[in-house]
Amino acid sequence: MFKNLFKNTTAGETEEVNLDPAKMPQHIAIIMDGNGRWAQRRGLPRVAGHKRGMEVVKDITKAASDIGVKVLTLYAFSTENWKRPESEVSFLMDLPVKFFDTFVPELIENNVRVNVMGYTEYLPKKTQKAVNDAIEQTKNNTGMVLNFALNYGSRAEIITGVKKIATEVQNGDLAVDEINEEVLSKSLMTEEVAPYNDPDLLIRTSGEERISNFLLWQIAYSELVFTDKLWPEYQPDDLVHDIYEFQQRDRRFGGVKDTKGGKSK
């Protein structure tokens, strides 16, 4: 656990802050945006941004684990990203191979377990093997779960979940009246990281303020933080800053605050 943590100020300086362990987000989800723009601003090919972004994933993973986060979900490749240039998609499919080849020993050292959610059966065989090997090699780790959303799209996920429920009803294993929020939640891909299915905090880098088909059901009551930092520039101090901002918010989950000093209702 970090004892002295720092957040960035608007003046570009740093300020010491203390995170409250009692208010630590158990599940943080990040839309890692801005790799291409980071590269283009430096006159580099877009893939250079993805390569740098991979190194940032390593830094943020270790920082989140040290801070005490239970699940870190990273939006690595969406079902819509296949529309990108073939050369870029090919590079992105190679990244998990290179990433896990170098990082799995550190994940094991840090007791971090790998999980991957998405339609991985449509990924290239080499990518599937890299993913499955990392899952197998870290399966006995009991610390934070590093959860990659890979070939993932939330609308497709919800449709898949609804079809699963419909099949159960059709087979007589579930009554229509038994369908509720819990049933639907369990039919989604984040059931693999239960009981931390729903993120407490969603972060998006690069200044864009949209969700981009990511965890639409699960973020119903998540706190959203949008940062101007491009993902290749994002550092552990930035993560601390965003967690600190999260801890200053009053989460009421649709209720109202008890002005007499009690808990929110």
Image: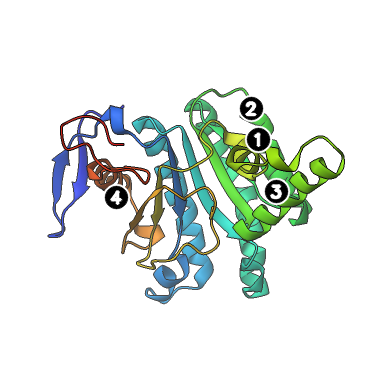
First in sequence: mark 4 or mark 1? Answer: 1
Which label is found at residue 238? Answer: 4
Which is more toward the observer, 195 or 113?
Answer: 195
How packed is label 1: few (under 14 Cα within 10 Å), some, or many (20 or more)? some
The residue beneath circle 2 is 139
- Tell me the quarter of the image containing the C terminus: top left
**Relative side of 222 to 242, left or right:** right
Give the quarter of the image for residue 33.
bottom left
Q: Are marks 2 and 1 in contact (CB under 8 Å)?
A: yes
Alpha carbon of mark 4 to alpha carbon of mark 2: how far? 29 Å
Alpha carbon of mark 3 to alpha carbon of mark 1: how far? 23 Å
Alpha carbon of mark 4 to alpha carbon of mark 3: how far? 35 Å
**Relative side of 63 to 129, left or right:** left
Mark 4: amino acid: Asp
Task: Give residue 159's position: percent from left, percent from top.
Answer: 70, 56
First in sequence: mark 2 or mark 3? Answer: 2
Give the quarter of the image for residue 167.
top right
Judged from the image, the secondary structure of the residue bearing numbered disc 1 is helix
- In the displayed structure, 7 sits above or below 195; it is below
Alpha carbon of mark 2 to alpha carbon of mark 1: how far? 6 Å
First in sequence: mark 4 or mark 3? Answer: 3
Residue projecting furthest to the right: 171
Mark 2: amino acid: Lys
Give the label, 4 or 3, closer to the camera: 3
Mark 1: amino acid: Ile
Mark 3: amino acid: Gly
- In the displayed structure, 170 sits above or below 230; it is above
The residue beneath circle 3 is 161
Which label is found at residue 64? Answer: none
The residue beneath circle 1 is 135
Seen at 41% across and 77% down, the residue is 43
